[in-house]
């Protein structure tokens, strides 16, 4: 049974390396019985069209040259891909076909459709043979055996039977796109780029689960990503909008591609054959995703006013020129947008009913949610006028608006229009994990921050998570009343359900903000990245995970162009990560970072003078929201060790946590066991600190918990631990809770660069997380 119908366009098969890549995609993504629809390799169809034109013009030199071109290209592909004996068989078949074409050229018996069909036949045959050579059961199939047309109509029932008969369940079926046969066994074509249509038709006939269109872009974008760098890739678009784009001549899908899928649950996706790991765009049924905004360009068209346009005449005219024709009505009058290259033919066909209104037009069209189209239309007109483009005609419909201009909309202009119409209207979905000390203050600050964030684009809080429950609403939660909603609507969840919700979220951008202290939650980051989420962490676990895991997360983020911010994981709200990044960007080389990196331990050490038990101070710090959820994480020095590792990795050092020496601020024995065990033995902590403090006092020193990383002659020495410092030392004069980062570098060798300030506390930390969120949104806009 066929599960998936894949379709590969010409650019995916342009040379031997591409065939190899396509074969790998097929091997990795299909099973026996699946169908692979192929177009003609590279520019073969264009070359065949040239041959046809030369033939019509009786240009025998021309057509011999083109035949030679075809022969060379196909021979090269065969030679590079196949072993000698298989290559020989395919080459002799090819030679006899080319010989036959040459005879038909001589005898004036060439037929256009049969000629064009050769491109797809050659691709299918070569790919199937190549798959066989790689050891896979594959066959090539001529779609004229599967798709039959009578008087322009596909014979669906017959075709289903033909597919049942010819598509092998125990092979990969490589089928020619673009072509079908009529009831006289004559070749008919399905229009330029008609292979998409072949794929969806076959999927319908064999009741496949999915159609996957592999192309040279990563999916469907808000505009042409080759021209506009900040074009947005959409994860999902709905069929109606995909159809509209195709009708407006956007090349991403062929105009008829979606029609066979009507009323079916067959999934359709567009993916890149150049980056097969990247998720593409899914084209879903109406109502299964929100409507997006698209900007598509129009080039070289003529505008016709037509009286009495007949039913189905548009389809006939499109078939005639093998091209999409745009159509709309203004005040009951029909207008057609026809590629200028085919204008004469259309004009002849329409006769007196067709009146040429304007010729040689260019322009662009906006496809958008209905409620925005009118406003978008006005904005588009204003924007194009500002760019000094001469507007010759414009039209606004329910779900799209088009403006036809004299000039071509070049990449610069397209970028500007895109920024106004689309860039400024993006939405980001925010998911906050951790609603404790810091998380709850973060949400308090959220409402105030919203106006600032929304200068860039719309921000929606869509998910809140604690360890066992979550509250999720893709349309947005009320950040001012989240507690009420939480009480009423939060539900238990497992991580798989969370990932599913994240995957389904249909926003231009998504960010998971991790304000938990959970190692297991940070273990889900790769899943979040696969769901295309940016990351912001106050949690330190991912930043200090084993280096191989950490690097692979970074690679996955980079591949998807996703960002990860974690400024608060060191120094709470202090801009330590920014400073290190800036120094390195300026070409500086950091040689040492040293100081007090724990707000908790700073607060405790500064307050401790022996008049009060250390443990009492610890509980006070815990109440203030300074400590880690389990304060032993602070006392053990692990938390500081993590911070030093995060900074080390910021410097590009490939360290792991155990590369940093550690001496704790408590007896080792207290680190074991439960929190209750710790409380039962708390006197050991008081003794430990008391003894060290007395010793320091004898030397007229005070205790501080220090972190130190030095790079000497390329060698790294990193350690964290308790130190006794003289009263004159800057570490001694710290205000309780302050962090101090002392940075030495090439430029700051003698006089260190010092960053000092509160290094813990829910308000400063929550504000620091907001700073990361603001940075992210600003950088995305
Ligand atoms: N406090 C500070 O000054 C600073 C803190 N940080 C970091 O901020 C983070 C949060 O600290 P803080 O707010 O004090 O911690 P809290 O203990 O107060 O809050 C932790 C929150 O995380 C939730 N949580 C725990 N495990 C999971 C999980 N697996 N999935 C989803 N949610 C989970 C908890 O939910 P539940 O209630 O259900 O357990 C709770 O809501 C820590 O990583 C800390 O290191 C960073 C800089 C400074
Ligand atoms: N316990 C931590 C809180 C922030 O990371 C500290 O005080 O450093």
Image (tube, grey):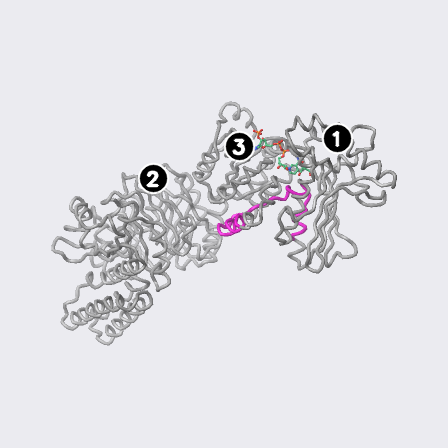
Q: Name the residue that disc number 2 marks.
A: 285
Residue 229 x, y percent position in the rendering: 48, 55
Q: Name the residue that disc number 3 marks.
A: 464
Tell me if 382 is positioned left or right of 332 in this view. Answer: right
Residue 717 x, y percent position in the rendering: 70, 52
- Badge 2 marks a residue whose secondary structure is loop
User: Is 369 rendered above or below residue 357?
Assistant: above
- Cα separation, mark 1 vs mark 3, equals 39 Å
Q: Please tell me whether mark 1 or mark 3 is closer to you in this view.
A: 1
Neighbor class of circle 2 (other Cα within 10 Å; few <14, some 14-19, many 20+) is: many
**The magenta stretch spans which residues?**
552-581
Judging depth in this view, the residue of 100 and 663 nearest the camera is: 663
Q: Which mark is residue 304?
A: none
User: Is 681 rendered above or below residue 366?
Assistant: above
Neighbor class of circle 1 (other Cα within 10 Å; few <14, some 14-19, many 20+) is: some
Residue 609 x, y percent position in the rendering: 83, 33
């Amino acid at each position: 049974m066929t599960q998936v119908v894949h379709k590969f366009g010409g650019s995916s098969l342009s040379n031997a390396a591409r065939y190899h890549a396509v074969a790998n995609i097929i091997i990795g993504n299909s099973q026996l019985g699946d169908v692979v629809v192929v177009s003609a390799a590279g520019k073969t169809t264009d070359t065949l069209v040239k041959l046809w034109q030369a033939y019509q013009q009786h240009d025998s030199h021309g057509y011999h040259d083109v035949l030679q071109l075809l022969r060379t290209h196909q021979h090269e592909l065969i030679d590079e891909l196949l072993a000698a004996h298989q290559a020989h068989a395919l080459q002799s078949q090819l030679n006899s076909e080319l010989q036959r074409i040459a005879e038909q050229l001589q005898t004036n018996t060439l037929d256009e459709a049969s000629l064009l069909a050769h491109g797809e036949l050659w691709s299918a045959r070569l790919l199937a043979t190549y798959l066989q050579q790689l050891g896979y059961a594959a066959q090539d199939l001529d779609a004229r055996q599967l798709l039959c047309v009578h008087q322009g109509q596909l014979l669906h029932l017959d075709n289903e039977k033909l597919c049942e008969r010819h598509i092998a369940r125990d092979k990969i079926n490589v089928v020619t796109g673009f072509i079908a046969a009529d009831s006289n066994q004559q070749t008919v074509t399905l229009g330029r780029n008609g292979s998409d249509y072949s794929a969806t038709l076959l999927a319908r006939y064999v009741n496949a689960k999915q159609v996957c269109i592999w192309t040279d872009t990563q999916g469907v974008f808000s505009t042409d990503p080759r021209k506009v760098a900040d074009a947005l890739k959409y994860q999902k678009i709905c069929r109606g909008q995909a159809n509209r784009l195709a009708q407006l001549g956007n090349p991403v899908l062929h105009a008829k591609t979606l029609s066979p899928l009507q009323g079916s649950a067959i999934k359709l996706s567009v993916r890149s054959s150049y980056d097969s790991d990247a998720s593409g765009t899914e084209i879903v049924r109406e109502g299964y995703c929100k409507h997006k905004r698209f900007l598509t360009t129009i080039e070289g068209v003529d505008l016709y006013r037509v009286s009495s346009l007949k039913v189905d005449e548009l389809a006939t005219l499109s078939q005639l020129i093998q091209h999409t024709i745009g159509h709309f009505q203004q005040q009951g009058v029909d207008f057609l947008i026809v590629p200028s290259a085919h204008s004469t033919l259309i004009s002849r066909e329409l006769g007196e009913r067709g009146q040429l209104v304007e010729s040689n037009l260019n322009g662009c069209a906006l496809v958008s949610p209905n409620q925005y189209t009118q406003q978008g239309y006005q904005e588009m007109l204003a924007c194009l006028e500002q760019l000094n483009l001469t507007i010759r005609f414009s039209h606004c419909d329910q779900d799209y608006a088009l403006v036809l201009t004299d000039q071509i909309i070049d990449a610069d202009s397209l970028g500007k229009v895109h920024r106004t119409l689309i860039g400024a209207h993006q939405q980001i979905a925010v998911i906050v994990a951790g609603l404790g000390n810091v998380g709850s203050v973060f949400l308090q600050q959220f409402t105030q921050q919203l106006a600032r964030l929304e200068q860039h684009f719309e921000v929606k809080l869509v998910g809140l998570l604690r360890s066992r429950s979550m509250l999720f609403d893709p349309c947005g939660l009320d950040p001012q009343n989240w507690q009420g909603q939480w009480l009423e609507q939060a539900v238990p969840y497992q991580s798989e359900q969370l990932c599913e919700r994240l995957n389904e979220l249909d926003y231009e951008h998504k960010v998971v903000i991790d304000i938990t202290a959970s190692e297991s939650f940070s273990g889900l980051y790769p899943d979040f990245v696969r769901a295309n989420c940016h990351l912001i962490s106050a949690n330190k676990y991912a930043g200090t995970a084993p280096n191989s895991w950490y690097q692979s997360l970074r690679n996955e983020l980079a591949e998807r162009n996703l960002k990860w911010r974690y400024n608060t994981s060191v120094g709470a709200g202090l801009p330590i990560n920014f400073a290190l990044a800036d120094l390195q960007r300026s070409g500086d080389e950091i040689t040492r970072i040293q100081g007090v990196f724990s707000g908790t331990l700073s607060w405790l050490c500064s307050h401790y003078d022996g008049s009060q038990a250390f443990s009492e101070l610890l509980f006070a710090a815990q109440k203030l929201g300074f400590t880690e959820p389990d304060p032993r994480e602070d006392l053990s020095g692990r938390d500081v060790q993590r911070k030093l590792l995060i900074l080390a990795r910021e410097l590009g050092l490939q360290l792991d946590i155990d590369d940093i020496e550690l001496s704790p601020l408590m007896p080792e024995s207290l680190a074991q066991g439960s929190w209750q065990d710790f409380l039962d033995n708390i006197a050991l902590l008081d003794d430990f600190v008391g003894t060290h403090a007395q010793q320091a006092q004898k030397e007229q020193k005070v205790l501080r918990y220090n972190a130190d990383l030095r790079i000497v002659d390329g060698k790294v020495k990193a350690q964290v631990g308790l130190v006794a410092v003289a009263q004159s030392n800057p570490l001694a004069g710290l205000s309780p809770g302050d962090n101090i980062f002392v940075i030495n570098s090439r430029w700051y060798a003698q006089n260190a660069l010092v960053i000092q300030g509160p290094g813990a506390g829910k308000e400063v930390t929550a504000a620091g997380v907001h700073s990361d969120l603001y940075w992210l949104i600003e950088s995305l806009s």
